Each structure stands twice: as C-alpha cells, then as structure tokens.
Amino acid sequence: MKINVYTPNFHRITNNYLLDELRKYNSKEKVVFRPNWKSGYKYQIEVEKASELHDFIHNFYAYGKNPKILADDDGEWYIEMKY
C-alpha cells in the first residue's frame, strides 16, 4: 500500500535517522501545496504489512514528529506530521 507522508509549512525532515527510515521505503521528497497550510513536503512510502506501518509511525513518534494517520475525501490514507 502506498501512503503519502506530509510535513506542513516548510518543515523538512532533516534528521539523518529519519531520512534513513524514509529511504527504506524508497521515498523521495516533493514540495506540495495543501489548502490548510502555506506549503510543505510530501514523501511517499510503500508498506506491505501493518507491522511496517506501525514501525514507521513509532520511529517518527520517538523523534517528536507526532504523525497522525488520516484519510482524505477519496478514502485514501495518508500520514500528516504535526509540528
């Protein structure tokens, strides 16, 4: 399953450990504009098992990024980092 990860208002992920976590899922960074932010960054990860998603979220919680799993109007899941 592909899941988008968004960071709001130009909050780029710069921590080397977290960047390594993103690289595990072949993620690339893109600048995006969303209605409720000025703009931010989007990373897309692909997970096969719920345990991978759990580990991903747990690692970001541990570094204070406060990820939230949400669904958009189309029912697609995404993760939003709250700063």
Image (cartoon, helix red, strand yellow):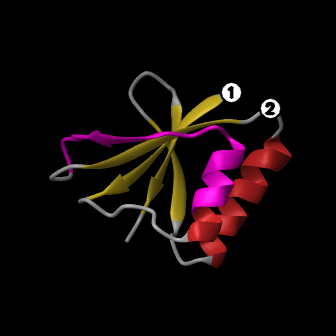
Q: Secondary structure at mark 2?
A: loop
Left/right placement of residue 83 relative to residue 25 reads left
Q: Secondary structure at mark 1?
A: loop
| Percent position of residue 45, x then y | 61, 38
**How many dots with numbers?**
2
Task: Please report the residue visible at 64 percent of the width from the left and 47 percent of the height from the top.
Answer: 23
* Mark seen at residue 48: 2
Q: Is residue 24 magenta?
A: yes
**Is the C-beta separation of discs 2 and 1 under 8 Å?**
yes
Task: Please report the residue visible at 30 percent of the width from the left and 57 percent of the height from the top.
Answer: 8
User: Which one is in front, 19 or 63?
Assistant: 19
State which quarter of the image contains the N terminus: top right
Picture layout, residue 62 above or below residue 14: below
Q: How far is the residue under mark 2 from the one under mark 1?
A: 6 Å
State which quarter of the image contains the C terminus: bottom left
Left/right placement of residue 65 relative to residue 9 reads right
Left/right placement of residue 49 relative to residue 14 reads right
Picture layout, residue 76 above or below residue 51: above
Label 2 Cα crowd, 10 Å radius (few <14 / some 14-19 / many 20+): few
| Percent position of residue 5, x then y | 49, 46
Task: Please report the residue visible at 52 percent of the width from the left and 69 percent of the height from the top.
Answer: 66
Task: Please report the residue visible at 20 percent of the width from the left and 52 percent of the height from the top.
Answer: 37
Write down the region rendered in magenta: 19-36
Q: Is residue 1 magenta?
A: no
Q: Which residue is mark 1?
A: 1
* Mark seen at residue 71: none
The amino acid type of the residue labelled 1 equals Met
Find the residue positioned furthest to the top: 74
Find the residue positioned furthest to the left: 38
Q: Quadrant of residue 27?
A: top right
| Percent position of residue 16, x then y | 58, 68
The amino acid type of the residue labelled 2 equals Glu
